[in-house]
Amino acid sequence: MDRDVTKTHNRIAQNLAEFATLTEALDYAATGDTGANFYDASGELIAALPYGELRGLAVQTGARLNQLGLQRGDHIALIAETGMDFIVLFFACQYAGLVPFAMPVPANLGSHRIYVQQLRGLLATGEAKAAVAPGDYLAFLKEAAAGSHDLLWVGASEHLIDVSDSSAASPSKAAPLTPNTASEPAYLQFTSGSTRSPQGVIITNNAVMRNLRAIVRHGLAVERGDRCASWLPFYHDMGLVGFVLGPIVSQLSVDYLRTRDFAVRPLQWLRLISRNRCSIAFAPPFGYELCARRIRQADLEKIDLCCWRIAGVGAEMIRPAILDNFARAMASTGFNARAFLPCYGLAEASLAVSFSELGRGLNTMSVDALVMAERGVAVRIQSEQRKINEIVNCGGAIPDHDIKIVNDNDEAQPDLRVGRVLIKGPSLMSGYLGETESGTEGLRADGWLDTGDLGYLFEGDLYLTGRRKDIIITHGRNIRAQDLEELAEQQPEVRMGNASAFGIDDDTGEPTVVLVVECRLAEASARQTLINRLQKQIYAGFGIRCQIDLVPQHTLPRTSLG
């Protein structure tokens, strides 16, 4: 296979997602010069996969899948290691009329039992009829699949993909392929499981294509000559839809770094952007925080980030201080803070729901934290003595979609009034796997989806304030768990993402606020000092008593993005 990196500039006319299905999009991209490129932890190119070769391999592999006794619409589980095999298999399913779903790679190779249990649950919940893994993960998959009577085939991707021949024609003896149609499911996307067990979201070709069209035409305003870079996992909606499907439907080349390699060496992501002159790259806030914390100024001397046109940020609540720190740390590289593009989305909407304005950078509203907690209203701060919440503007809804805010009685709320975020539009899911149409959780008969998030609108733009399940109600007040967690993470002994706040009722039924903090402190006096400091600051800022529990590292469960 060609080891030269795929080109940035394409010889074919750019088509920004004006296709009915994902296979139509790949058929067109295959006629050009762009493709996907995969790098190791040292930043060396492992493989380059032009979209023409991807199509040929996908068609051939789809024919092999059809020889396994599968029926049209069957679900195929794919362990989503960042590599060419996953993308080939994903599109093989599209050409063969099958429905793939991505399963994660292990976050920690030491958690064998937990990982196998996770795979076993996803295989059952996803109603898989076949399951495929790269060779390195086949033993895990076989252990998870042992005893299943539903699986017709379990094997390694190498048994299905023949990289020695990527011609566009399928084997002559194979039955002709009938790709998934616009109205049929394109794939299942499992939710992150941040507030409940992961659920399989059913996404049709029509839904994802409508979302992709809005992303590349409106949200990103993709230009000829754009190039993408990503370390996002393929099993997360932002990684799959945003940086596997997005580049294909707009015929852009993309450079991939494995998620775990980024976690260890975040500098390699920035080097990829600089070396290949990438203009579009996204990360959740913790990705930017990791770069700013891990990278030394000397590391940046040979990095030029002037090319980075869109630095997207989403997938979790956005903390302005993290992005400010990143921009300051990258100032010497030519990074422009106006490249920041806050956005909002979720798997149930295929991916994107709203985008802020391109080229504007981070735009926030400073509101009175106590008024928001007590009255549910975003009031601009009037006194420097009051506690401030900096709420990020996530922009307006993508074309043909709507956002509204409602209270607990489903009454629409005016600007600046906090309530439940509802969305509506053509890129919403068909439902959750295993649920009847009448019983689809969150998706109403009138087409509105309750996202489970809280926020408010102002002049047509969405400002997120948290998740409904992350609001702690104590003594008649609504306390954002995020506010307590941020306070904990500001302590020098605590890292970002190592705190979790929630409310419980004690034996008398009275509400108790609990803050669990991962820390490495071993000495009893140092631990007590941290507890006392946190309790004092929480009481001063929020007027509540809080139970602080210090726990070992890796105690708190993580979502699919960490």
Image: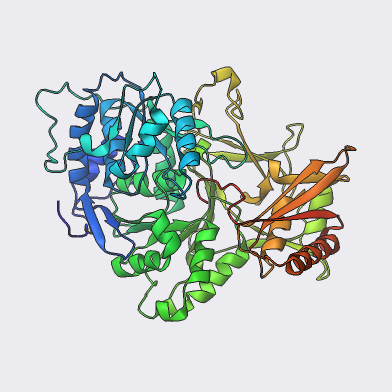
Q: Nearer the viewer, residue 30 or 236?
A: 236
> Which quarter of the picture shows residue 397?
top right
- In the picture, measured across the screen, residue 497 lies left or right of residue 16, that is right
- In this rendering, does residue 455 appear at all? no
- Compared with residue 161, is residue 40 higher up or lower down, i.e. above or below? below
- Compared with residue 368, is residue 237 higher up or lower down, i.e. above or below? above
Residue at the location (65% across, 40% down)?
404
- Compared with residue 549, is residue 171 higher up or lower down, i.e. above or below? above
- Compared with residue 168, is residue 125 higher up or lower down, i.e. above or below? above
Residue 406, x across and y down, in percent = 71, 37
Residue 95, x across and y down, in percent = 26, 30
Residue 402, x across and y down, in percent = 57, 39
- In the picture, measured across the screen, residue 408 lies left or right of residue 222, that is right
Which residue of the protein is positioned furthest toward the left in this rendering? Answer: 172
Q: How are the colours assigned in the image?
A: rainbow
Residue at the location (35% across, 78% down)?
302
Residue at the location (74% across, 51% down)?
480
Which residue of the protein is positioned furthest toward the front in this rendering? Answer: 523
Q: Nearer the viewer, residue 20 or 123?
A: 123
Q: Nearer the viewer, residue 208 or 123?
A: 123
- In this rendering, does residue 151 appear at all? yes
